[in-house]
Amino acid sequence: MPLLRRYAGMATAEGGTPNNGTGVDLRASLGRFLRRPLASYYLILGSAGLLLLLGLIMVFSSTTYMSTQQFGHPAYYFTRQLLWVLVALPVAWVISRMPLRFLRALSLLMVIGAIVLLALTYVPGLGVVRGGSRNWLDFGGPFLLQPSEAAKLALVIWAAHVFANKGKLLRHWRHLVVPVGPIAAVVVGLTIGQGDLGTSVIMMLILLGMLWVIGVPTWLFGLTLGGVGVLGVYLIATAEHRLARILTFLDPFSDYSVTGYQPANSIFALANGGWWGTGLGASTQKWGPLPEQHTDFIFAILGEELGLPGSLMVIVLFLAFGYAGLRIATRTKDTFVRLAAAGITGWFMVQTVINLGMVLAVFPVVGVPLPLVSYGGASMVVTIAAVGVMLALAKQEPGAKEALAARRRRRQRQEART
């Protein structure tokens, strides 16, 4: 009895009520964790790190047969993916420790560089067509560059910087439109001209989300949203292959051999996996029936091999990332931090929803990879760099800097003792 009273007293002191079960213990532990100043930092780091690790595993699993057939050994694509990750991690580490004023100072150069690279895709001999889109650059080396991926991050950072500088001027709608509107139109226009509608849609939705966070007047937001909708309908209606995808995505089997081939085989993969999956490495769709199984449709292979638990794990990790991003945006008083966090979080969440929608045949196939999981060079580097930006933003939360300083002092004392 004294032991029980002592335990109840400890629980009451920590959480207000005695713990009477594992569920209460977990809720109390989660509550204590979320009250920590660095909770968002660790959520971003943990969720992104686990997604990256899972992505490497699935890239290897989904490409063993293809790598063997094309290059004679099973780890070709995995090795390239690992190389890009090893290149990107130091970049993210540097960005996460970079003062925000320096990042903001670079934002204009970033967006100018993105526009130049996008324009170079139209130069004969440099621009490369893949998957029906001219959105790759080939400078003659072993790797191709996809400028539209870098343009997403550059546009978010620069727009957040411009809006933060304007301050109270944003009460006037003209300052909401200029100069972000024209520059964004150039970036999106160049991306649309490449034939990459999926990335263009993501860019427009990111900017709409940032405008919503700013508190744009309802009439202007509605006008912008309507303009984006009209543009999307026009682009779909004037391209035969896009219109065919829209007309068949609800029933991929109606045109199985052409536009419905990818989504139909994605459904086959998920159905084959069932509740518990076939086991890691035991996918049948990766042997050829499912195109782009390591890029846009890697979630289908993951669902086939790891079943519902693996699929839910990916969704939970993305939700944790999204929660942390929104937490940063709502807790900070810095306008740049709020807008940049909202923009990057919106980018990741929108792209994830679109990708999962393609895999589940809920949305048409628009060629959008799953962040941090799908195979890709430039997209992986830029995505990991964006995680580095989010870590830098997380350090601006109330009490975060003090907590980091205290952690450094503890580490120094421990090193001094040894």
Image: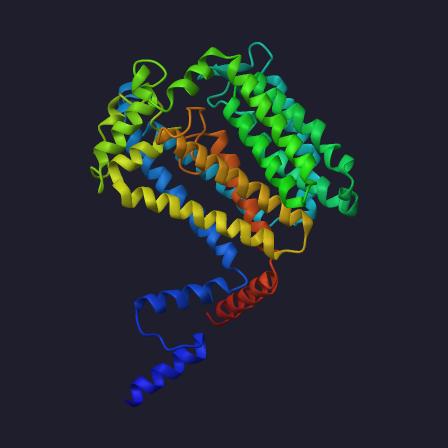
Identify which residue is drawn at 57% across, 20% down. 192
Horizontal side, residue 203 vs residue 48: left or right? right
Q: Locate residue 187, reporting x and y percent.
A: 63, 25
Q: Quadrant of residue 112?
A: top right
Q: Quadrant of the N terminus?
A: bottom left
Q: Locate residue 238, reporting x and y percent.
A: 53, 12
Identify which residue is drawn at 59% across, 41% down. 343
Name the residue furthest bottom: 2
Q: How is the image coloured?
A: rainbow
Disc tally is 0
Identify which residue is drawn at 67% across, 45% down. 215
| Residue 143 appears anywhere in the view | yes
Q: Quadrant of residue 298?
A: top left
| Residue 139 appears anywhere in the view | no
Q: Locate residue 60, reporting x and y percent.
A: 31, 33
Name the residue furthest top: 124
Q: Relative to residue 340, is residue 149 depicted above or below?
A: above
Q: Nearer the viewer, residue 374 or 241?
A: 241
Q: Nearer the viewer, residue 404 or 223?
A: 223
Q: Nearer the viewer, residue 309 or 161?
A: 309
Q: Nearer the viewer, residue 323 or 144?
A: 323
Q: Locate residue 173, reporting x and y percent.
A: 76, 37
Name the residue furthest front: 219
Q: Relative to residue 164, is residue 154 depicted above or below?
A: above
Horizontal side, residue 74 vs residue 38: left or right? left
